[in-house]
Image (cartoon, grey):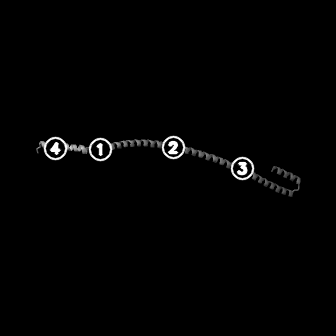
Amino acid sequence: MTINVTQLLSQVVMFAAFVWFCARFIWPPLMRAIENRQKQVAEGLAAAEKGRQSLESSARQAEQTVAEARSRAAEIVGQAERRAVQIVEEARTAAKEEGSREKAAAKAEIAQAYTRAREELRGHVAALAVAGAEKILRREVDARTHGDLLADIQQQL
């Protein structure tokens, strides 16, 4: 195959027409598409950076919130423990007071029972003394001696 000047010139003209056509109709839309894609990529990278910063900020804020919650929980636990100790002390004090009241009531009841028993015993002793005196009086008639004995018994009771 031989190449002559006419063919070479026609090839150069065709190539120049092809370059002009590509530069005029194909290259601008292609460059716009590439620029749009570059803008989208740049915006995506900026949004990704902003998201990363937001994520870091949120992570710090979450850590701070967790630390505050732990601190608050520790305070609540401490308050609950102090309140529990206080309730136990109050219950202990109330129990001691109730025990003291019951003890005083029991002592008063014992004293009353003691007094009643004493009075009842005196009554029995007096009845026995009278019964004994009746028996003595029936056997012996010495009233003056027996009267003195009965007076002594009454004074002792």
* Residue placed under numbered mark 2 in the picture: 72
Neighbours of disc 3 within 10 Å: few (<14), some (14-19), many (20+) = few
Q: Earlier in the sequence, mark 4 or mark 1?
A: 4
Q: Earlier in the sequence, mark 1 or mark 2?
A: 1
**Distance between the alpha carbons at the discs numbered 4 and 1:** 30 Å
* Residue placed under numbered mark 3 in the picture: 108
**Distance between the alpha carbons at the discs numbered 1 and 2:** 58 Å
**Distance between the alpha carbons at the discs numbered 3 and 4:** 137 Å
Q: Is residue 87 left or right of residue 130?
A: left
Quadrant for residue 42, please give it.
Answer: top left
Q: Is residue 140 left or right of residue 43?
A: right
* Residue placed under numbered mark 1 in the picture: 32
**What amino acid is at disc 2?**
Arg
Quadrant for residue 140, please give it.
Answer: bottom right
Q: Nearer the viewer, residue 47 or 20?
A: 20
Q: Earlier in the sequence, mark 2 or mark 4?
A: 4
**Residue 56: where, in percent of width, then height?**
41, 42
Q: Nearer the viewer, residue 49 or 94?
A: 49
Q: Is residue 121 above or below residue 1?
A: below
Q: Earlier in the sequence, mark 3 or mark 4?
A: 4
